[in-house]
Image: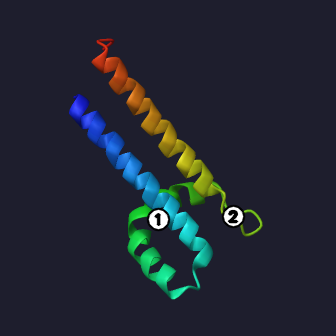
Amino acid sequence: MNLIITSLISFLQIYFVLLIVRILLSWFQTAEWAGQIISFLAPITDPYLNIFRSIIPPLGGIDISAILAIFLLQFVQSSLAQFSAATLAGGF
């Protein structure tokens, strides 16, 4: 069980980095090199981001739904880490 949780935490850490890169590169959409990377990352990250975009529309051209998506991802990751620590300590 701990191996599954640890693997899931590692996956979420990698996905977090991909989200950050995707969000930062959205500021440079006109650059050719950024467009290539975005086209690679969009199918991976946009389904998750679209969940939050449907809840929170852009305000004044600023997409704040990504902030909520990152917070939720970090919350899930830290919750899994605490559950894993409790499992190792014999709490569950």
Residue 74 x/y as whole percent: 50, 42
Residue 21 x/y as whole percent: 49, 64
Task: In the rendered view, tell whether residue 10 sits above or below residue 41.
Answer: above
Q: Please name the residue that numbered disc 2 is placed on.
A: 58
CA gap between label 2 and label 1 equals 15 Å
The residue sitting at 24% across, 29% down in the picture is 2
Residue at the far right in the pictured view: 60
**For numbered disc 1, what is the local secondary structure?**
helix
Mark 1 closeness class: few <14, some 14–19, many ≥20 residues within 10 Å: some
Mark 2 closeness class: few <14, some 14–19, many ≥20 residues within 10 Å: few
The residue sitting at 35% across, 22% down in the picture is 85
Q: Please name the residue that numbered disc 1 is placed on.
A: 46
Task: In the rendered view, tell whether residue 40 sits above or below residue 21.
Answer: below
The amino acid type found where label 1 is placed reads Asp
Badge 2 vs badge 1, beta-carbon distance below 8 Å? no
Question: Along the horizontal axis of the image, is 1 left or right of 28?
Answer: left
Q: Nearer the viewer, residue 84 or 44?
A: 84
